[in-house]
Image (cartoon, rainbow, N blue to C red):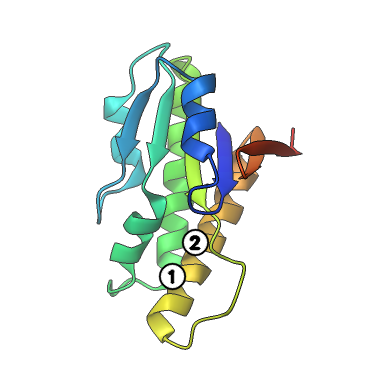
């Protein structure tokens, strides 16, 4: 699994499209479990997951606590990674970096930043390669 992290309009999609021109792109839907993506993967075809921030935004109103969400997506990330390896699928997740700048006053916006940060950490822990993209330039964060 590879993870591409960067701010809005940093060039993440362009770089991923260049590296994986034949990929299937999947935008996460609000309330969808990550493991549902397994059914969409095609053997031997790169699979790109994006829309993580909007997906996380939908979970803010959920009754599930942060620990519950983390447990779900960690289990799902491991299932995705295992399934992708079994099917020889290059799995890529694109995540927006929203942890820089002024901390918002509104509770919901702070919670979104927390969820996004935790998801990024958990995804990075599962990833074989993590890339940071800024101004269309790419820097490896791990290998």
Quarter of the picture containing the C terminus is top right
Residues marked 1 and 2 touching at CB (< 8 Å): yes
Looking at the image, residue 65 lies above or below residue 87 = below
Could you tell me how far apart the alpha carbons at marks 1 and 2 are, in whole angstroms?
Answer: 6 Å
Q: Nearer the viewer, residue 141 or 83?
A: 141
Q: Tell me the quarter of the picture where residue 109 sits.
A: bottom left
Q: Tell me the quarter of the picture where residue 15 sits.
A: top right
Residue beneath label 2, please?
116
Q: Position of residue 13 (x, y in %)?
A: 46, 35
Q: Nearer the viewer, residue 125 or 27?
A: 27
Q: Position of residue 37 (x, y in %)?
A: 32, 35
- Residue at 47 percent of width and 60 percent of height: 70
Q: Nearer the viewer, residue 128 or 83?
A: 128
- Residue 112 badge: 1
Q: Helix or strand or loop: what does disc 2 sit on?
A: helix
- Residue at 58 percent of width and 78 percent of height: 102
């Amino acid at each position: 699994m590879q993870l591409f992290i960067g701010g809005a309009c940093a060039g993440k999609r362009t770089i991923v499209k260049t590296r994986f021109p034949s990929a299937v792109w999947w935008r996460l839907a609000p309330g969808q479990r990550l493991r549902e993506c397994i059914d969409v993967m095609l053997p031997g075809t790169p699979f790109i997951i994006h829309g993580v921030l909007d997906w996380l935004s939908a979970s803010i109103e959920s009754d599930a606590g942060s620990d519950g969400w983390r447990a779900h997506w960690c289990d799902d990330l491991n299932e995705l990674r295992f399934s992708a390896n079994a099917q020889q699928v290059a799995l890529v997740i694109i995540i927006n970096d929203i942890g820089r700048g002024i901390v918002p006053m509104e509770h919901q916006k702070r919670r979104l930043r927390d969820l996004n940060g935790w998801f990024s950490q958990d995804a990075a822990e599962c990833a074989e390669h993590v890339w940071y993209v800024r101004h269309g330039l790419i820097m490896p964060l791990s290998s």
